[in-house]
């Protein structure tokens, strides 16, 4: 099939089933008691009702009778499947309820309009649980999963408020790719749905180009290639799969195996650069942006100098194929908002679905040729990314975006702070 874009960056870990260790199962949220959801889950649900600049209808507790009947029927089916773990059931319950709340509450559509795509997604989660897909160093996107991703994400992405800045640079990238050169996008990263954001902007948006997003190859961490809830979306994308530094020694006995996998991934990337005509998206920060102490996503997370330098070194190993580096920024955190802080323990996390726009910006090509200091390239790339991010925020305020304008961000900031406090309370309770 066609090459597909890559995945929602470094995210989830080892799935699984019979024989799964208690420590691993504990890394996912335990299923809530029937009469009381966990503090962490309530915290996540609070984001669903408070991220918007005004009270939203997207609260799962406000589902119509029809929508409640649909979600109850789907979850009854999920719970009846023996392969479904308690953690997966808990995650799917919140994820699908908030998804249906967007469809019915925000958009006013009938719940029946998304039953088929929700059921297809659940079937793919079950498929991963029954027969886990093993992602190699280089994964090629699969058509049926790409089709699922497109259908599932359609209600969540507000295309009327979505913006691509620097489209003229995308045209130059196309010319470079057609000439056999390589393109590396050095970008921030905000949500698991970032690959879907690229598809929306280029498959359906003003920058329409049916091949630009689908040829992207994204550097993806182990979370999105092992969490059964994320895998259906990840299989839609072209991925260079790595184990992140944060998880490479968990558990310690697999550290060597993971290191060997990462070495093979570097080999696969070098082969792509030798081949030429490839576009790679990477987030040198190593993960998703997180809000500041005021609860605002005011700036991208800083780039890791070693990550940027590694790409420079790899590109220099292939002098006969030119590799171009382009600064890129994304403003997408509204979709599947991340926990306010990086987890240092378990790797599972609750999911909520929210409606929002997707915004991206390209800047002028980066010139690393005269930089001698090993940290200078990362500083230059980050400075350009941060400027582009500021441009996206300014554009959002100018058009009064209901998701990312200054007013909307201020309205959301205190909720982010409160949510982090609740996560910390839950973490303390879990270790008590």
Image (tube, rainbow, N blue to C red):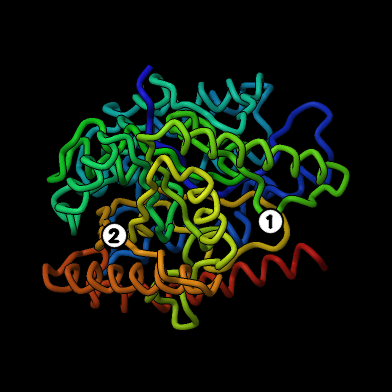
Q: Residue at x 18, y 38 (%)?
A: 204
Q: Is residue 112 above or below residue 21?
A: above
196 to the left or right of 11? left
In this rendering, which labeled residue sits more in front, label 2 or label 1? 2
Mark 2 and mark 1 residues within 8 Å of each other at the beta carbon: no
Residue pointed to by mark 1: 245
Dot 1: within a 10 Å radius of its alpha carbon, few (fewer than 14), some, or many (20 or more) residues?
Answer: few
Residue 252 in view here: yes
Give me the C-alpha separation between circle 2 and circle 1: 29 Å
Does label 2 or label 1 sit earlier along the sequence?
Answer: 1
Q: Secondary structure at mark 2?
A: loop
Q: Is residue 424 above or below residue 280?
A: below
Q: Position of residue 111 (x, y in %)?
A: 30, 32
User: Which residue reaches farthest front?
Assistant: 320
Going by the picture, which residue comes out furthest to the bottom? 294
Labelled disc at residue 365? 2
Res 331 → quadrant: bottom left
Residue in the foreground of this view, choosing between 147 and 419: 147
Few, some or many residues within 10 Å of mark 2 (<14, 14–19, 20+): some
Decide if residue 58 is on the left or right side of residue 427.
left
Horizontal and vertical percent position of residue 236: 43, 29
Residue 83, located in which quarter of the rendered image?
top right
Q: Is residue 114 left or right of residue 76?
A: left
Quick one: quadrant of the N terminus?
top left
Q: Is residue 120 visible?
A: no
Vertical arrangement, residue 221 with respect to residue 290, above or below: above
Q: Secondary structure at mark 1?
A: loop
């Amino acid at each position: 099939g066609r090459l597909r874009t890559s995945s929602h960056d470094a995210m989830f870990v080892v799935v699984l089933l019979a024989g799964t260790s208690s420590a691993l199962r504990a890394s996912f949220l335990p299923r809530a008691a029937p009469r009381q959801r966990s503090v962490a889950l309530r915290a996540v649900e609070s984001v669903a009702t408070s991220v918007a600049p005004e009270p939203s209808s997207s609260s799962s507790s406000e589902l119509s009778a029809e929508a409640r009947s649909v979600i109850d029927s789907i979850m009854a089916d999920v719970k009846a499947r023996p392969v479904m773990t308690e953690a997966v059931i808990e995650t799917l319950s919140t994820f699908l309820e908030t998804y249906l709340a967007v469809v019915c509450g925000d958009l006013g559509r009938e719940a029946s309009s998304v039953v088929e795509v929700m059921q297809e997604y659940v079937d793919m989660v079950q498929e991963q649980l029954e027969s886990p897909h093993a992602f190699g160093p280089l994964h090629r996107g699969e058509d049926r999963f790409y089709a699922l991703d497109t259908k599932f994400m359609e209600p969540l992405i507000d295309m009327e408020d979505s913006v691509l800045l620097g489209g003229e640079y995308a045209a130059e990238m196309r010319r470079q790719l057609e000439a056999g050169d390589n393109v590396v996008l050095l970008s921030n990263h905000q949500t698991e749905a970032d690959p879907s954001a690229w598809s929306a902007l280029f498959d359906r948006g003003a920058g329409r180009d049916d091949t630009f997003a689908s040829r992207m190859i994204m550097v993806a961490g182990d979370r999105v290639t092992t969490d059964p809830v994320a895998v259906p979306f990840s299989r839609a994308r072209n991925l260079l799969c790595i184990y992140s530094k944060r998880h490479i020694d968990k558990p310690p006995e697999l550290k060597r195996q993971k290191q060997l996998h990462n070495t093979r991934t570097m080999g696969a990337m070098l082969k792509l650069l030798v081949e030429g005509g490839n576009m790679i998206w990477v987030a040198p920060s190593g993960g998703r942006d997180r809000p500041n102490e005021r609860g605002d996503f005011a700036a991208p997370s800083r780039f890791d100098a070693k990550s940027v330098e590694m790409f420079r070194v790899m590109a220099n190993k292939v002098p006969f194929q030119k590799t171009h580096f382009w600064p890129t920024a994304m403003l997408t955190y509204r979709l599947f908002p991340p926990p306010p802080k990086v987890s240092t323990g378990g790797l599972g996390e609750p999911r909520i679905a929210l409606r929002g726009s997707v915004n991206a910006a390209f800047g002028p090509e980066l010139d690393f040729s005269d930089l001698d200091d090993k940290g200078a390239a990362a500083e230059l790339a980050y400075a350009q990314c941060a400027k582009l991010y500021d441009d996206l925020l300014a554009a959002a305020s100018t058009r009064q975006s209901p998701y990312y304008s200054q007013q909307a961000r201020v309205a959301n900031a205190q909720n982010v702070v409160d949510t982090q406090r609740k996560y910390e309370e839950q973490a303390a309770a879990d270790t008590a």
